[in-house]
Amino acid sequence: MLNSVIVVDDEASIRSAVEQWLSLSGFEVQLFSRAEDCLAQLPRHFPGVVISDVRMPGMDGLELLQKLQNEDPDLPVILLTGHGDVPMAVEAMRIGAYDFLEKPFSPQSLLSSLRRALEKRRLVLENRSLHEQADIKARLDSTLLGVSPSLQTLRRQVQELAPLPVNVLIRGETGSGKERVARCLHDFGPRADKPFVALNCAAIPEHLFEAELFGHESGAFTGAQGKRIGKLEYADGGTVFFDEIESMPLAQQAKLLRVLQEKKLERLGANQSISVDLRIIAATKPDLLELARAGGFREDLAYRLNVAELRLPPLRERREDIAQLFEYFARTAAERLGRTAPPLSGAQLGRLLSHDWPGNVRELANAAERHALGLGEPAPELAEAGQSLAAQQEAFEAQCLRSALSRHNGDIKAVLNELQLPRRTLNEKMQRHGLLREDFLKDA
């Protein structure tokens, strides 16, 4: 339930009286004597109502209304007016004020207007949230491709975790798309307009690790010419992605843990602490807690990193996604090269579906690029066997259904005619393969 109210009035007696009335009625009240201060401190998507006097020194209530309208046209503003300001208040309502009350006003009239305004605000914010979630879902669907149940679960988990201020550990094999998932957690969260810094812990020489993370002052060590901002300081307000976190040296693990605990760091050669606000996303192949119990990783840091965990399934566990991913990578590569990707034959598709893809999505993307270049087989080294006939048939069937639904933009009647299937059979197959008609509509 929304109950936040901002009151702006230059008269202390009015502010005090209004605060008392509203507090006794269960509202959370924030007071300002100047409109300029209200604007400076108003949070984005403020979940409440602004009550403002019209006549104030400096910025008046009408100017405040206009600036608030520019920031959020749906934010309800109730104006408080003197007797001679009624025509002005009527004009203010024409340009967007929710209501006006003429002084002196009764607590009952203020509360009645405020409750109606808060109800309107609640409906607006709920509707806005639904639209934002639908937009995020659509963008995730086009970023983390796949129709398999495991990918649908992953997208849902990413959408749920992205806005939360928690560290996330991503587990997955090499090439399974861990950095792409980390990027989604950043891009679809409140830190999206701040830096996203990716570090591969296995690629940084141990003797350079501390300087890379924390930066240094001039002369901190041999060769340290000039001050350098480290990756953690640069990412302040944003997200740091540590790939292959299991490769981080133990000495640096202790220092990273201290940063996470204290939200402060020190550059090499400096004595002054610098405050940092970071979200950490780490990726690993092995189980960090098992590694910690074996003495290969700090257990306390493992718990700090693993507030929430996402598991990325290997490509061999979601074969129904292979054809869609291959088509996407081949098309993207062909467009980049200014040519058209040749179509896949049935035999080629069969080999794609039967291969185990030890390099996961990265290996598949390479095979698709070779195909776009017209180098014959998508990947000559693909094995002819490796999966049961039943499993290959299931994957091929899922791809046929997905392609037909995509071609006909979710038109079930057209799909039935093309595939020559009874409606009940199509429904059962779509349910078994996790295919939803809504995902193939033009406006989906």
Image (cartoon, rainbow, N blue to C red):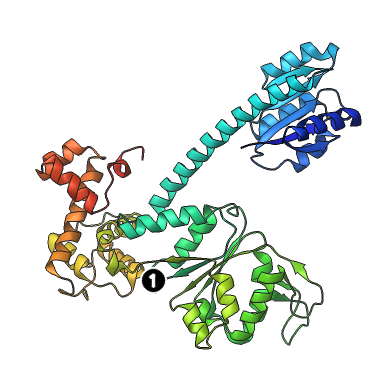
Q: Position of residue 129 (x, y in %)?
A: 52, 40
Residue 54 to residue 256: above or below = above
Q: Residue at x 14, y 42 (%)?
A: 424
Q: Secondary structure under badge 1?
A: loop
* Image side of residue 181 versus residue 438, left or right: right
Asked whether residue 377 is in view, the answer is: no
Residue type highlighted by circle 1: Gly
Which of the pair 68/224 is nearer the observer? 68
Q: Position of residue 155 (x, y in %)?
A: 41, 55
Q: Position of residue 120 (x, y in %)?
A: 60, 27
On the rendered image, what quadrant is the C terminus found in? top left
What residue did someone put label 1 on?
175
Asked whether residue 278 is in view, the answer is: yes
On the rendered image, what quadrant is the N terminus found in? top right
Q: Residue at x 60, y 55 (%)?
A: 191
Q: Residue at x 74, y 21 (%)?
A: 108
Dividing the picture into quadrants, the one containing residue 304 is bottom right
* Image side of residue 84 versus residue 222, left or right: right
Q: Residue at x 47, y 52 (%)?
A: 159
